[in-house]
Image (cartoon, rainbow, N blue to C red):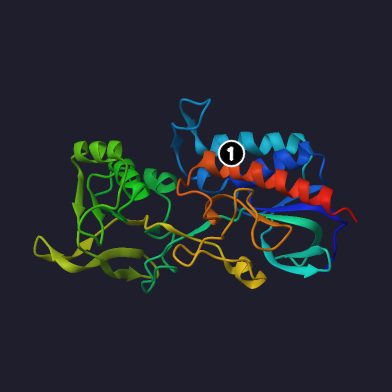
Amino acid sequence: MTQSKNLDVLIAGQGAAGFAAGLYTARYQMKTAIAGQDFGGETAIGGIIENYPGNNEIDGFDLMLEFKKQVTDLEVPIIEDNLKSITKNENRFLCELNNGEILDTKTVILAIGRERRKLGLKNEDEWTGKGVSYCSTCDAPLYKNKDLAVVVGGGNAAVEGAILIAKYSKKVFLVYRGEKLWRPEPILLETLAKTKNVEVILNNNITELIGSDLAGLQKIKLEQKYKNESEFIVDGLMIEAGADPRVEIPTALGINLDKETNEVIVDKDQKTNIPGIYAAGDLTNGSNLKQTITAASQGAISALSAYNFCLENKD
């Protein structure tokens, strides 16, 4: 294992929160590095964004490219590897990456986001990319002229996914376990109602994935029969069932988590219960609005907090 020279701040995550934090820490002239493998976070795979100020319409991936360019223009190094662990070492932190490199830093900003939720079914992992997917905006074009696609979930992402895939697939089932869809935006419900080739199946779950290792997913089985059928031949399954905060590192470090949401608890300055450790974006309980704009604002706030911490705790 190799150990880097001292940093003022290590930012974990290449999403909106991480890039915004990097922009601000660089402008504060802090010695900064960003580590993470997943470029752009949820924003990069979110498709067209129409509610980010200053852009009437912009692709999320392109928006994240602009975020990244601002950071790299300020010569902030980006390490294409994920953070594995954090160890407290006197008044500093030793941050180990998956590749074994250790970064020595005075502060850490965690902007590692969330992990897409799975159904937990047999063959789900094995058939990911072979009929099973977790990103509607990424894979919708794959369903062009296909007969049937299934989207699982009841929130904004699932409804948006069903509407998008319906532009390509001849028929889309939107399956949700609840009695009604779970609080999607009214404008999305209006669009869904006008999308004639989407059929909503409520009070139901997918209980089995049927296919083969060679062909991948071929059929799904429902818990309750729908129109006298429990099995359907499908061309793809899109799982948009939400996401859970990535809390392995925070838990190991002893960072406090919200008992209800399992999110990292932060105050108005994005501080955790451990001095020198900050968190921003979808990982935190800082806002119920999980959007690019809130993640970016929290990243900026965490940068200021890290800067003040370094000023107050000079070696």
Q: Residues within 10 Å of mark 1 (few under 14, many from 20)?
A: many
Q: Residue at x 56, y 35 (%)?
A: 63
Quadrant the N terminus occupies: bottom right
Locate residue 107, reporting x and y percent.
76, 56
Q: Nearer the viewer, residue 230 or 256?
A: 256
Give the quadrant of residue 134: bottom left
Image point (38%, 43%), residue name:
141
Asked if residue 136 is positioned above or below residue 115 in the image, the reply reads: above
Please provide percent x and percent y for residue 180: 22, 54
Residue 279 seen in the current view: yes
- Image height of 137 relative to 129, above or below: above
Q: Is residue 105 above or below residue 120?
A: above
Q: Which residue is tagged 1? A: 64
The x and y percentages for residue 182 are 29, 53
Instruction: Find residue 240 and report its image quarter.
Output: bottom left
Seen in the image, is 8 located left or right of residue 261? right
Residue 19 visible to an observer of this rendering: no
Q: Which element carries disc 1, helix, strand or loop?
A: helix
Percent of width and height locating residue 233: 23, 61
The residue lying furthest to the bottom in this view is: 122
User: As drawn, is 43 to the left or to the right of 83?
Assistant: left
Residue 13 vs 118, above or below: the answer is above
Query: Residue visible at 64% across and 59% down?
Result: 272
Residue 226 lies left or right of residue 144; in this view the side is: left
Give the farthest residue toward the left.
228
Q: If the image is split into quadrants, where does the C terminus sit?
A: bottom right
Q: Quarter-wise, where is residue 248 in the image?
A: bottom right
Total number of numbered labels?
1
For badge 1, the amino acid type reads Met
